[in-house]
Amino acid sequence: MCDFIRGEETPLNHARLLAVSAALLISACAAVPPNLPAITDAPAALSSEGRIIWHDLLTTTPAESRRFYGELFGWKFERPAQPVGFGNDDSYMLIRHEGKLIGGMLDANLLNQDENVSQWISVMSVSDINAAVERVIASGGEVLTEPTDVGSRGWIAVVTSPDRAIIALLQTRLGDPGEADPQVNGWLWNELWTDDVDGASAFYTALAGFRTEDVPIGGAYPTYRLLRSGDTPRAAILPHPFEGELPVWVNYLWVADPAAITARVPKLGGTVLVDARPRAVGGNAALIAGPSGAGIALQTWPVKQEAQR
């Protein structure tokens, strides 16, 4: 959770989000759908509806991005065991942290877009991809990429909510990763920044069966809206802290010291978008971009408090 101040110069270029359009993910950039590897080595559940279970990085600078995230967070990059079906051997790579699969990286140059489309894409679990897409349409959203079979990974679709925030939906073929406590330098949390909190809440509640809870936090935002599956927090929605920007899903990494990390970012070819600062909910947060411009958030989180995931 962040407490960035509304009205600052935005660090997020949402023209990138719209430029990707229906070619947003790998499923849309090959004549024959690729065979993407599964997102976990040890599936534990057929589906965990509504949970963000994966993150894909689209980057126009894959080599520089590997070095950046590897040196900054200790991530490891590896080629899938089987060819994915397009591009060269490094066109799509898996990302591991402490031995665990946490994401993928696509060479965005394969998308042949005129603009830089580098960004992190959140992937949400659904139990039935076709039914989920029907709910998207019924709730006023838009389907950018129809449900597509991508081999071992399962079936994927790229959609937007009525406010145009983009998210990918995935019905895994082999099963979702099990629930696990977050790790330092691994994924911690996901937020939707939008100027229509109520509308977005209604959309995602219809899509994934969430219940909402408003948590008073003070500061720039009187309340913080959680999306829960039962008693488990899955994500949050808050008013967009940057004026004039379209809604966007923001991905957070759990870090021990955001300021120490931001001090290293420029030397590794990245950019500090928002310096580390206190949050109304406690701890500190920062916003950075990798060498290609893809933004990602950093935050601390007290070990003794509930780890949002």
Image (cartoon, helix red, strand yellow):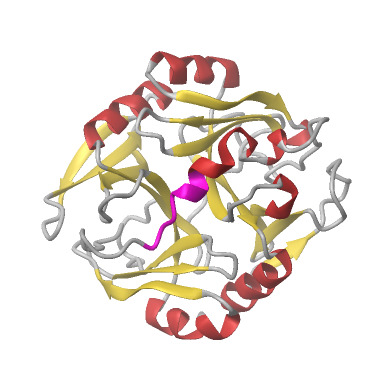
Asked if residue 16 lies in the magenta stretch, the reply is: yes
Q: Residue at x 69, y 34 (%)?
A: 28
Q: Is residue 107 visible?
A: no
- Residue 114, percent from left and from top: 63, 50
- Residue 101, percent from left and from top: 67, 54
The relative height of residue 10 versus residue 155 in the rendered view (above or below) is below
The relative height of residue 239 versus residue 63 in the rendered view (above or below) is above
Q: Residue at x 32, y 37 (%)?
A: 227
Q: Residue at x 35, y 33 (%)?
A: 163
Asked if residue 196 lies in the magenta stretch, the reply is: no
Q: Toward the viewer: 38 or 66?
A: 66
- Residue 175, percent from left and from top: 66, 33
The relative height of residue 303 versus residue 47 in the rendered view (above or below) is below
Q: Is residue 40 left or right of residue 200?
A: right
Q: Residue at x 84, y 49 (%)?
A: 87
Provide the residue span drawn in magenta.
11-17
Q: Is residue 150 visible?
A: yes
Q: Quadrant of the N terminus?
A: bottom left
Total of numbered circles in the picture? Answer: 0
Q: Is residue 124 left or right of residue 300?
A: right
- Residue 296, percent from left and from top: 47, 61
